[in-house]
Image: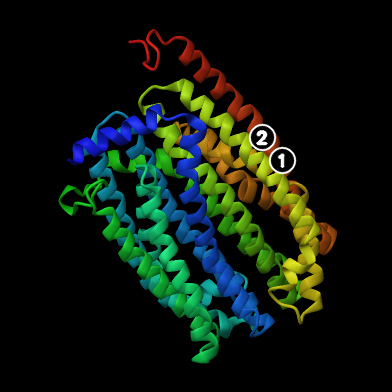
Amino acid sequence: MKQKMQTEKFKLMTETPIPKLVIMMAVPSVVSMLISALYNMVDTFFVGKISTQATGAIGIVFPYMALIQAIAFFFGHGSGNYISRELGKQNQKSAEKMATSAFTLTLMIGCAITVAGYFLMDPILRLLGSTDTMLQDARNYFRYILLSTPFLMTSLVLNNQMRFQGNANKSMFGIAAGAILNIVLDPIFIFVFHLGVSGAAIATAISQFTSFVLLYILNSQSDGIHIKFSTFSARLFVWREVTAGGLPSLGRQGLASVAVICLNNAVKPYGDSAIAAFSVVSRIAMISIAALIGFGQGFQPVCGFNYGARRFDRVRQAFWFTAKVASAVTLILGILGFIFAQPLVTAFRDSDPDLIRIGMTALRFQAVVFPLNGWIIVVNMYLQTIRKTIPATIMGTARQGIVFIPVLFITLNFGLHGIQMTQMISDIITFIISIPLVIPQLRLMKAEEKSTQIPGELAS
């Protein structure tokens, strides 16, 4: 039965018309990413009703969450890319071994981070950019986020492994259930039980544990690649393959965390309102980026399966279809973000005029170049899935890392307005970098397609 289901999935992934298939895979991924973004969005929204300091505290802890997500994506995307290629080759046993190994390693690392975080809580929070007036709120939020770290990390690994198998609907359900629970619990813990910022963190921790349990159960069903601890391996081969497919994600998310730390410290001289304003803007931008990444993630299993099956014509077709749709959508989102910047920021904290003023300007600068992000993200995912590790890592780390951080140190010389323009300048430079990285790879794949002797198969 299981073999039959895997055969049917292979046929689906390699024969369904590309536009239909990408959209089919993308819809649950978009929903999953949007719901994941809601975790921090909901916390920021409700905590914003407490105080500016509490709002800023959420922004202080955000780089830590981005960092642990980076590690989880390293294992999730690294193992997932390998799994999709192996399933494209119909090598199920090797896919199962990789799934188990990546999951187990992530669980072990997550537990170690939790323990270390409790011993080093205050130094970590100050490094993340906390002011003295925010420190207690940051502590209250951070301690419960630390407890949930292993479950957040392993749920992200399971989510990505399921998605790369073509089981995006099930992964969406697991993530969605936790996020909906978070939306329900946040106001209860914050306002009914009067737990303040601690209540937001407790709600998030419970929700992440719920997602973990559901994803583990759903992944264990008959049509999935099961976690079998007897097949666990930490051999060099596992690390090499995870690194090849996951390093771009680690670089992207990891440097994004460093970038937010630098940003928090850069705006610290402008007060708590400035820190809170950039925290709010990052949550608003995160929703749009999440939708974009979700659509790109619908492309990844299509790319991986067909690359493994040597259907290079379908890989190229999927790339261009995804890039066109993503660019069109980001154009619309950019226009809406520019027009409605003030009401969007005001929705989070309407009683702080400095926060609104600073956040509105920063959001409008980002909205101007937001259409470039459609291309940037799809290029990154394409290079990552076809195992072009170095170009993919450059793309993954550019927008909020190797480009953003140097630009930030330059724009510091132009005061607050310079800092507000940093992400816009970084996006423009990243778009320019993407062109010479992806065009040669597309030309190479077209040449491989032309060299095919039998349609759909690579000449031997």
Q: Is residue 113 visible?
A: no
Say whether residue 315 is left or right of residue 162: right
Q: Position of residue 161 (x, y in %)?
A: 35, 48
Vertically, is 146 above or below 312? below
State if disc 1 and disc 2 touch (CB < 8 Å).
yes
The residue where tag 1 is placed is: 429
Mark on residue 373? none
Which quadrant of the view contains residue 202? bottom left
Residue located farthest toward the left when viewing the structure as drawn: 230
Query: Callout 2: few (<14), some (14-19), or many (20+) C-alpha neighbours within 10 Å?
Result: some
Q: Position of residue 372 (x, y in %)?
A: 70, 41
Vertically, is 321 above or below 414? above
Say whether residue 95 is left or right of residue 178: left
Front-most of residues 4 and 48:
4
Q: Mark 2 falls on what kind of element?
A: helix
Placement of the N terminus among the 4 image quadrants: top left
Vertically, is 397 above or below 390? below
The residue where tag 2 is placed is: 433
Q: Position of residue 242 (x, y in %)?
A: 36, 43
Front-most of residues 246 and 91:
91
Residue at the spot 54% in from the left edge and 45% down from the top edge: 295
User: How far is mark 2 from mark 1, CA to CA?
Assistant: 6 Å
Q: Position of residue 165 (x, y in %)?
A: 34, 42
Vertically, is 451 above or below 316? above
Front-most of residues 172 and 103:
172
Residue at the spot 45% in from the left edge and 61% down from the top edge: 68
Q: Mark 1 falls on what kind of element?
A: helix
Placement of the C terminus among the 4 image quadrants: top left
Q: Is residue 355 visible?
A: yes
> The disc labelled 1 sits on which kind of residue?
Ile
